[in-house]
Amino acid sequence: MSHSDPITPPPAPRPVVKTAATMEFVQKVHKVERQHTKILAPQLLLDSEAPPNCMRMNVLIATVNMGNAMPTQDDIGELVPEDGDDKYDVLVVGMQEATFGEEEALPEPPSPADGTGGSAKKRGSKPSIMTKAVKAVKKVEETFRGVISSQDTSDNKFTTTDMPTTADSTALHAMLERHLPSYSGVVRYQRGEMRLHIYVRSSLVPALTDVEVAAENTGIGHLLANKGGIAARLTFTDTSLSFVTCHIQAHEGKEHFQRRCADISEILGGTKLGNPKRYDVSLISHHTFVFGDLNFRTDFGKGKKENKELCYQALGKGDYEEIYRHDELQRAICNGECLTNFQEGDCSKFPPTFKVKRHVKGSLEDGHSVEDVYNPQRTPSYCDRILFTSLPGLEKKLKQVKLEAIPKYSASDHNPVRSTFTIDVPAIEDIEWHFPSALMSRRPKDANLKVYTSTPVKADSDRIIRDYTPDNFDLDHPDSTPEKREEENIFKDNTNLDRVCKVTFLDMRCRNLTEMDPSLVGGGSDPYIQFVPLSDHLLKRQHIKKKRNTLGNGAFSHYKKTKTKRHNVNPVFDDVIELEIDLSQEKDLLNGKFLALTIIDHDDLSEDDLIGTVVLNLASLVGGEGGNGVRPKSIKGGTSSIEISKPVMKNSMVQGHFEGTVEMCWVDGKIGQTMKSKKFGEIAGGCCVIS
């Protein structure tokens, strides 16, 4: 985010209702205001280039296969700018083959000739048999650790560990921390030879409300961690970001390509974060980044020898576009074989990142020949990648600024890749005063605030009283007359002031769903649709029944669902599903809120299986704004209509297609009558139909 003058805190409140209970409550609210102003105002500053009511977050992501060689401090400087170059809010580094021997990780002890102590053994003397044996045992230990172990050394309040820190981790952390003195390591996680480090500007850490980390092994037997991925999900107030670093199957050939696609799907499916934990991170996080040594190769459709010759010819001409056109990952995305909903920058702006010769600083762009740069054992390929995606309606909030390779990092046979992004998140003036949505999870326990009207909180005391009331407000206080309570909009039952939107799903149908049942029982699937909000407190509680989750995740809120259609991969649902969305807040606070249409395969003898999910942006639905996969249909009887036609996604792969109609009607919870509001979209005759 841009750093400019801090935002001036709101003016001091002026009390209006002179009662002991209300004054005590106002003091509590003022305490919360001061805390949030103190925490947030110095760090989250408005950017002149950001859209209205938004601020701009700057993120840098780097991925490096270290080749099991300890980097130098200069190598670290090539990966990330010193102290973030005073412009990045979040720095993310994904590392592969990032374990090193103890002798590499620890500095060599000084020799006696230096007069500072150390071993008296001459440098040229041969090691003893015992020394060789000890080294061999240590090598086995390192290899064993490199395929099964995990370490979480994050220095923050979100994750803790009792696991010992190894020498290589200590050395690597020390170099990064010296290089980034103004940052806090909120994620420092190792699984096998993979590492994920996330550094957040220290002044921004108080705005970080949640951090989760998970990992998935895809190595030998799908058990060992020589290959796999690490995922971390960070929530800044009301915006969630997920970072997934991967190291997947190597080598050329169709079989290895198919394994790579399967590995990515397995990593996304096995690193479920957020709540509920039934969806992959790309469906439950506002913005998701996948990066690492993905090992996709250049494939001209020939044999290995011919592939390499054609690639060398293109490199000799400087025709990187020709190589990128024959990239396996680009083909896989276009064919829907993996990462279907992701995109990346143009890799053809730089030469392939693998397999380069170690200790050669520079690339073809620096005047080196193809033979000087690339190892002849492999076809040069774009193995190191950074991809990204956003949930529907949020695509314009994420922008890739730059994508580049780092050929001066010479310790590995991979050139690292780095990319920078800007992300527009809700502005501080929205975050600071919208406690229920943005900061309710971080409010002091003694605040006990509840939303009673749809007006955002401001700093003047009369607005605070109208918007909030404490749970223990004394309605029998002699100064609290019915007239004053009515005047200040203070009620015992908050449903009196509810604004709800009745959302009705009908004419629902799916086509080409993935077959989940084995051929022995007839194949096909037995699908039904479950309607799950991806944010708390969005659906009225009378529509939620507590029941054990059929997907096997323990106790779970079992939301409304359709009837099951037996043995049908092209089901047409006759159900009419009515939901009530709680809109006691402003529509703006529905930005970033989503509803998951979860399509599930029913099993009689085992747990139900997830087929896939359609994620709907509630702000788009409520506002009648349409968007990707949502388009106007017709206007009949004074109502408007929009159709929904969207792919069914699971682990970033298409599992079928969904179509349907949604009718929406606004009601006032107090009088139960239909409402009209231009602010929430074009609503004629009190109803809006969205399909």
Image (spheres, rainbow, N blue to C red):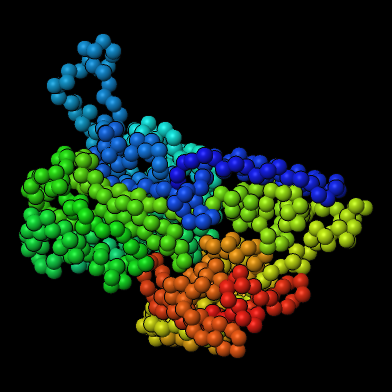
State left or right for residue 360 relative to residue 531.
left
| Relative depth, front residue between 282 and 7 | 7
Q: Please, which residue is most extreme toward the front here? A: 48
Which image quadrant for residue 142? Answer: top left
For the question of whether residue 293 can be seen, the reply is no
Q: Please, which residue is most extreme toward the top here? A: 115
Measured as percent of width and height from the top left, residue 424 is found at 46, 54
Measured as percent of width and height from the top left, residue 421 is found at 38, 52
Which image quadrant for residue 321? Answer: bottom left
State left or right for residue 611 relative to residue 42.
left
| Relative depth, front residue between 390 and 649 | 390
For the question of whether residue 415 can be seen, the reply is yes
Question: How many circles with numbers are drawn on the protein?
Answer: 0
Measured as percent of width and height from the top left, residue 51 is found at 48, 56
Which image quadrant for residue 512? Answer: bottom left
Q: Residue at x 52, y 70 (%)?
A: 620
| Relative depth, front residue between 611 and 334 | 334
Q: Residue at x 42, y 33 (%)?
A: 181
Measured as percent of width and height from the top left, residue 60 is found at 37, 47
State left or right for residue 38 relative to residue 605.
right
Q: Residue at x 65, y 80 (%)?
A: 686
Q: Residue at x 42, y 86 (%)?
A: 570
